[in-house]
Image (cartoon, rainbow, N blue to C red):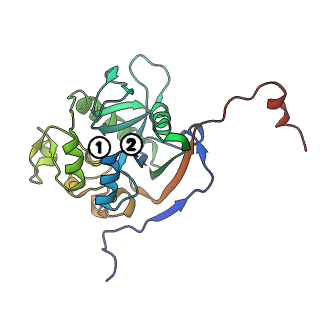
Amino acid sequence: MGASPSRVPKNNTYLTDPCTVDELMGTLDTGDMILFRGNSMSAWWIRWYEMCDYSHVAMVHIRTLDGDSEPTMCIWESVCHLDNLHCLLHGRVKSGPRLVSLRDKLNDYIAGSGTSREVRLCVVKLRPQPVEARMHLDQNLAGFEDHTCNRSYYPSHMGVVGSAMGVWQLPMGDDSLQRHGAAPRTDYTCEQLIACTLVKMGAYTPTLDVNKIHLKSFLDGSIPEHDRQLAVLDQINYHMIVKPPPPPAHGLIAMNIFQEV
């Protein structure tokens, strides 16, 4: 049988040379998605159940926060645990939907990798948009972050298991999404948050059935074409290895790299 007509063919590009956190961040734009490969037991279970190489998805947002004059590269995600990362909208650690520093997120991810000090992830980019469309996407994204993050959901570990089993729930009071028949909910899984975010940004229409979006949906091109609106996910999945920056060189050692052999 041929592929479903709603499926957009996706290509997987595997970058063999590890890049640093700075090199990765220099390639990212608002709306790009990063898929992480966790090392915990729950992450392993999700990967096994969904037959996916990754266990977590989040969205990049380059946002100028209140009181700042320069934008910060952030990551918008939902997590079921407390760690040492502070939500930039709350100024404290929290579970559920949160906006955190992308640099801190990546460094924390690397720190949890053990002795390898290298981590695997995948970047799925939103295709470039005209200026007005980019502004529209950004404004809608910030508005959804403010509205959703302030509600301070606290997903449980059972919510993570439920996400892998396809037991989806939607935010209470979200009429545009509840008409698909999903029950009100009090938490967000990571993929549920990103699917709802894409709809609220206007990247996809409200007809998108977010109940059917799984981690692999961002990788396999199965999001229906008729639900695409302002933005389209790029057809290339960029799989890569990220490492911490090398230690700073000093004195003559730093100078020698500029000398000809």
Find residue 197 and name its label.
Answer: 1
Q: Give the residue type that dot 2 points to.
A: Met
Give me the residue at 27% from left, 31% from top. Answer: 95
- Residue at the extreme front: 115
Quadrant where the N terminus is found in the figure = bottom left
Separation of marks 1 and 2 at Cα, in angstroms: 9 Å
Give me the residue at 40% from left, 23% from top. Answer: 65
Give me the residue at 30% from left, 47% from top. Answer: 42
Q: Which residue is mark 2?
A: 59
Residue 249 can be seen in this image: yes
Q: 21 above or below 120?
A: above
* Label 2, residues with CA under 10 Å away: few <14, some 14-19, many ≥20: many
Q: Residue 233 at x, y = what percent?
A: 40, 55
- Residue at the extreme top: 67
The kind of secondary structure element at disc 2 is strand
Residue 175's image quarter? top left
Q: Residue 143 at x, y = what percent?
A: 29, 32
Image marks 1 and 2: residues in contact by CB distance under 8 Å: yes
On screen, residue 260 versus residue 77, left or right, reads: right
Closer to the N terminus: mark 1 or mark 2?
2
Q: Residue 240 at x, y = what percent?
A: 53, 52
- Residue at the extreme right: 261
Residue 93's image quarter? top left
Residue 73 can be seen in this image: no
* Label 1, residues with CA under 10 Å away: few <14, some 14-19, many ≥20: many
The kind of secondary structure element at disc 1 is helix
